[in-house]
Image (tube, rainbow, N blue to C red):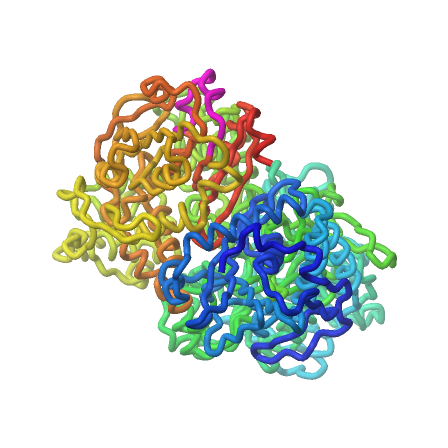
Amino acid sequence: MSFSRSDEPQLGTVLRCARAVAATPPFFTRRSKVPWPGNGSLSAPGAVSGAEEMLVAACLGVLARGHGGAQGEAPILRVGLLRASQVGPSVVPVVVDAPAGDLTCVEWLAHVRGAIAEADEVFAGFAPEDVELLLGQESDGGRRRLFSVLVAPREIELVGRTFGNDLTVGIGPGGLHVVFDERLFDPEILRAWMEDTTTLMDALQHGRGVVNEILAAATADRAGRDQARTVALYAAPSVATSIMSAAAHWPDAPAVVTANCSVSYEQLRQRYLAVAQALQAEGVVSGDAVGILVTAGPSFVAGLLGTIHLGAVPVPLDAQSPAPRLALAAGVAGFDILLADDARTAKALQVCASTTGSPPRVVDVDRAQEMPETTDPKLSAPAAVEPDAPGYILFTSGSTGRPKGVVQTRRTLDSVVDWQVRRSGVATRPRTLQRSALSFDVALQEILSTLADGGTLLVPADWQRQDLSLVARLIHEWQVERLFIPPSGLHAMLAAADASLLSSLREVICAGEPLIITGTVRRVFREINSGLDNQYGPTETHVCTAMSVGGDPFTWPDNPSIGTPVPGVGARVVDTLGRHVTLGTPGELVISGQTVALGYLDAPSLKFADEPRHDGNGAVRSYRTGDFVKERPDGSFEFLSRQDEQLKVRGYRVELGEVEAAALATELVTDAVAFGLGDSSAVERLGLVVVPFEPTPDFDKASLLEQMALRLPPYMMPRPAETMVREGLELTPTGKVDRRQVAQLGEMTFRERSANAGSGDERIRSLWHRCLGVDECDEDETFVALGGDSLAAVELTAALQDAVGVNVSLRQLLAGMTLRTLRSVATGELRSPDTSQQPGVTSSDRNAVPSTVDLPKFGRIACVSPAEAKHLYLDVVVSNNYGRFGMLDGPIEVVVDVGANIGLFALSVLDRHPEARVIAVEPHPAFAQALRANTADRVSVVEAAAAQTRGEAPLFIYDQMPAMSSLNPEPDYDRQLMASLIDNQLNRVGAGVATAPAIGLVGENPVAHPVQTVRLSDLLADHNCTSVSLLKVDVQHGELDVLLGLDDGDWTRIERIVVEVQDRDKQLDDLQQLLSMHGFSTSVHFDAILHAGSRVRFLYAWAPSQQKSAV
């Protein structure tokens, strides 16, 4: 059944929408059917019409932002309209994008009417099975579904068939109802969703107001009520009192154990009280800051507990940081006393000597512990401390080059420890491995939650702490039950370990980075029967959300959420103006309540605020995290990305500005740009580009890095191979440093180094240098002596196996292997990568068109890859990604199609505008041949690549994924992108199953093929184009170069532009700035179905003469 104007009744008589929400949620079963809150019902019970479907779909489209991409974009929702027919239920998929700009209710309904009509035309006569076969299923957190929401008129029952959708909205004589999977929806979240939908239905049917303003007002009001309800501060038990109680209950039980000693709870109590007495003798009182620079073990724990017992504020310092940086921290924190042990005394004296002003006094913590037991009654019990008084100070990376001191409260310290004790997956008294860096908040959580619960803290030696190849052996030997570890460390440990060594584990807690569930994680956790907890929280909030990854590990999602707020914590998602956004809309996460810090030393208000409570009962402390998230229907939050230029490098938080500041402080360079090498969610190393004061080929990189090492800890240091010297930095068209180009140059350096290594021996040398981050080295220096750690060893062993077929164990690399011994081991094992079994187009057939495919609307067409052709059909026809926002409305005279592929967009244009003139630009020879075959003489084909300059350039062609071919290839990214597209389109069998094969399928490197390049201005002149109705650009990694091929005077010829862009390193921002410079207005769209998990965005632009019609 299709909908047309002729059968549209007045909207005011279609639905009578409820305005009240029931006071309590209904009882939920596994898959529940509940009435709409307020008993929403039909005004005309006997009639089910297209208008009803349109109205509901319009509401769902507004709420589609819950299924979208990055902030500021207009995501989409796939809504299924269920229709009754003589042969059973049929279904029409309607792709509804969220309204952009200030669309009124009347305008929005007209837009949705068109979307439904288009869906009817495209899918007329398709059975549900055919629709599923063509579309594939959406992927979200490991789940697969054909639709997000199904709209079912007349309460059509779906016996044995739900299409995997999250919700079914029924329209029938009894009113509206919702069928949902109770495992996916929190009752309060579902209530909020239905409340928003009710408000929108009311506004839409009466044609009142602007859509986005109506929704923003409703959600802001609810957000305030939610805040008042959820942020209720409480006083947790004092951690100092809890540890004293544990010592009283289990005086002889082991509290802290190392390889050399075991300290009981009673011995630990005596030690930390002695430290408290020594601090008291030095004049320390409650509220004073105390620096702690002590080796991990009983002395550190005694120093920490003694400080807390006295009511003072511990400031743990990173012994790996240079003395000048620690001196800066000492000056900012203002402590007069610095606790140090024998191993750290020399470093402590360096800190004192480097401190400006009055230096702190060093107190020997080892000698302090030898003092006789105190009889001072003031020390018999922990000092009373107000919950909002300072509890501890930690330093994080600062963008100005000066470390930032975060002042956390005693409330945070007590509540996080109390929460962890109650949450622990270990029944009681856990045996916990203490390996977190002592200057990180996780170390406090690790140490104090173990001791407050009467557990045993197992502390390896310094040389063992960061060597991930030893962690599994330590777990086995010490029968460790609980492990705190960042995700990158977890992956490296599992890659190097035998699962049998981990059998004692009962709880693994991950934090510090986005958690990714790999096949190895699933396999090992199924064998060892351990829980996995995903915790989230920057230093400024400590742990604020958490998720226990439960159930069968084989069902765990690839990307678990960061969970729901811990007790006393409020969490909300806001836009750039601080306004609360609707459920599921991407935005910045704001944390408030129990665990929020007091602020930064010297800058307490930066990113922090005291917000009035909605109920008028005082204020609540809040912090803007800078992390982009979206709220899921179950009330948890999905982490998307970082907002600023901070990175996590192997679990450490790094502010790129601090790295750049350290380089500039050497006064050897005039400019410096730091960047991450690797995927943004798991950066493995830092790159640095510098411009010397005196341009010279003999610039001393070693001197630069040595001086930077005096200011930065090791994890913030770029390695020599990742440090590049340039005479200048690339700029964007607006004059800013082009960070994307800088990062690409760094990655290109690594690719070229590998590509230029021809023989097997040379490839081994190249991989050795790359993984160690060195340019050259002595062949007899060991892997460890050259700076190799277990993460680098994991990388090298995998690279050796993949590239040259050499099998080397982690144990061999870390046990003294040199480059010379590696080459000896490899003798007789070398091989070239096997390409004999690779499917797809071969190099000799690169110009051929080997296949055809049948597509709805077009029939049989020529193609290079049937799978790619089907995906392109979904992009062009079904999702209409190049025609959204009226791009093809009105008179269309000339269309320039850059990146025409096999011509589906050109055919779509001619289908709507038969008289239009289409100029199709396509450099790939096989695509160009298919393009000519499909369009005959109806299109002018230009077999060239659009670029910034005219001439000749290499087109890097992928035989197995030709659509990824590009003048600027990025093989690792291209392979991952194609894998995600294949997964989104074809995978129906569960989380992670198809991704690995997909990556293997496209695991090739591109081959250069010379092509002609043409500037857009030259193209317009060659074809006598005085005006262009639409310029469409779809190229890989070269969108900006295409537009820079337009002379300033030719921009006025272009009316509309649509660009498919890979939004990496602010590429989208650069394009928008360029378009804005030429007077174009823009809008951004993310196709959350076809491009889920990717950075593909669609950018639409209108010239000033077109902007009124664009609205």
Drawn side of residue 180 relative to residue 788, left or right: right
**Highlighted range, magenta:** 1041-1057
> Is residue 5 a member of the stretch shown in magenta?
no
Residue 70 appears at what percent x and percent y? 55, 47
Between 790 and 570, the residue placed more toward the observer is: 570
Q: Is residue 1056 magenta?
A: yes
For the point 18% across and 42% down, the residue is 846
Q: Eyeballing the image, is 679 above or below 1106?
A: below
**Outermost residue to the right:** 617
Outermost residue, top side = 1049
Residue 675: x %, y % from top left:
47, 39
Rendered position, 735 above or below 389: above
Q: Residue 98: x percent and y percent? A: 58, 49
Residue 739 in view (yes/no): yes
> Does residue 440 appear in this view?
no
664 w.r.t. 45: above or below: above
| Nearer the observer, 15 or 384 | 15
Above or below, 122 relative to 736: below
Whether residue 575 sits left or right of residue 111 in the image: it is right
- Image quadrant for the C terminus? top right
| Residue at 70% across, 65% down | 43
Q: Nearer the viewer, residue 994 or 692?
A: 994
Please state the horizontal and vertical placement of residue 1100, each as a whole percent of the image: 50, 36
- Image position of 801 (left or right of 482): left
Q: In which quadrant of the rendered view does residue 446 lie? A: bottom right
How many numbered discs?
0
Q: Residue at x 78, y 70 (%)?
A: 374
